[in-house]
Amino acid sequence: MVTPRFTYLVTSYRNPEQLYRLVARLRSLSPEAGVVVSHDRKSAPLDDGRLEPLRATWWPTPTPVSWGDGSYLLSILAAYRRLDPGPEQWVTTLSGQDYPLRPLAEYEAHLATSGANALLEETPDTPEEWNLRRRYVRRSHRVPAFAARGATGKLVRLVPGLTWAPMPHGLRPTIERPVLARPYRLRDVHRGNDLFAVDGTAVRALLTAPPRVLRHFVRTPTPSEGFAHTVLMNDPDIVVRPEMLHFARWQASAHPDDLGLDDLDEARASGRWFARKFTQDSPALDRLDELLDLP
């Protein structure tokens, strides 16, 4: 069996019909690529009968995935470990709510000629960004159910150094505290979007990072946005190309807005390769299919 040079690792937890549509589009645009779905263990199993004809496979995550903690990061690393890509192979992580904006043949040629081991978002050195990076020098603890409501948050805010952090999606809040013994100084911490592309050399660097580094990050808030960026950008043997792969529109939410037909011109003009996020029945997906099928 020939090992694919390009693999798309798709994370999913709901809307299986939307996932199958994305997998079918990836396969049509890249007939020889590997397509693997990392599916949240707590969700209903996927249908092998829908994925096998597309030469795609799915793996359940090692543990249920919860937003904002270390479970998502650990699931991605587990998938990397199973893929075990060689130095010339590329793995691109997508979510089930993403969709290509441009032909994947162009994207894969871009990866092959990038001269890099990783394409990661580069965030600006602004006061707001440094405040976000500070999350990776803090420890995050999910509060027990009995303490999630009532006066607990008010009491926590009275303790110097502690932060009460509300969570979206009905998740229990977390309590954050500073960590003095940490593997990186704040100035060496990096952060960015956790949907990126890495080659086998970069994957190996992530999988062989010192255990204390991984232990530190999985207990910080939203570690998937900090671990890979910090490890790779501090590794002198890894070439990182600053590049954001996805077009997204953000308002005041912790998640990107749903994109529609009116957003497609801007998305395609952005130069990005993928866009997120779309609803399952968005007419924007039909329009993208039309555009991607054009000669």
Image (cartoon, rainbow, N blue to C red):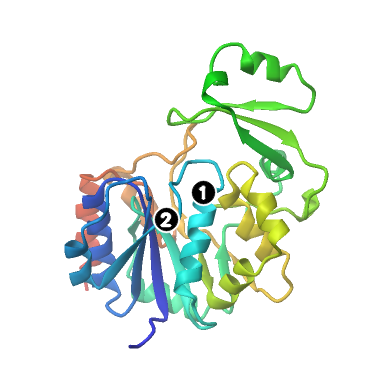
Q: Image point 66% across, 14% down: which residue?
A: 154
**What's the residue type where badge 2 is placed?**
Thr
Q: Where is residue 34 in the image (x, y as percent from the top left)?
A: 35, 74
**What's the residue type where badge 1 is placed?**
Ser
Q: Image point 22% across, 58% down: which residue?
A: 21
Callout 2: SS: loop
Residue 292, quarter of the rendered image:
bottom left
**Quarter of the C terminus within the rendering:** bottom left
Q: Nearer the viewer, residue 84 or 235?
A: 84
Q: Indicate which disc, 1 or 2, sits on the residue closer to the N terminus.
A: 2
What residue sits right under mark 2 in the picture? 61
Name the side, left or right, on which 109 lies relative to 167: left
Give me the disc on residue 147. Answer: none
Mark 1–mark 2 contact, CB under 8 Å?
Answer: yes
Q: Position of residue 227 (x, y in %)?
A: 63, 56
Q: Image point 78% across, 41% down: which residue?
A: 179
What residue sits right under mark 1 in the picture? 71
Callout 1: SS: helix
**Quarter of the N terminus within the rendering:** bottom left
Q: Where is residue 208 in the image (x, y as percent from the top left)?
A: 65, 70
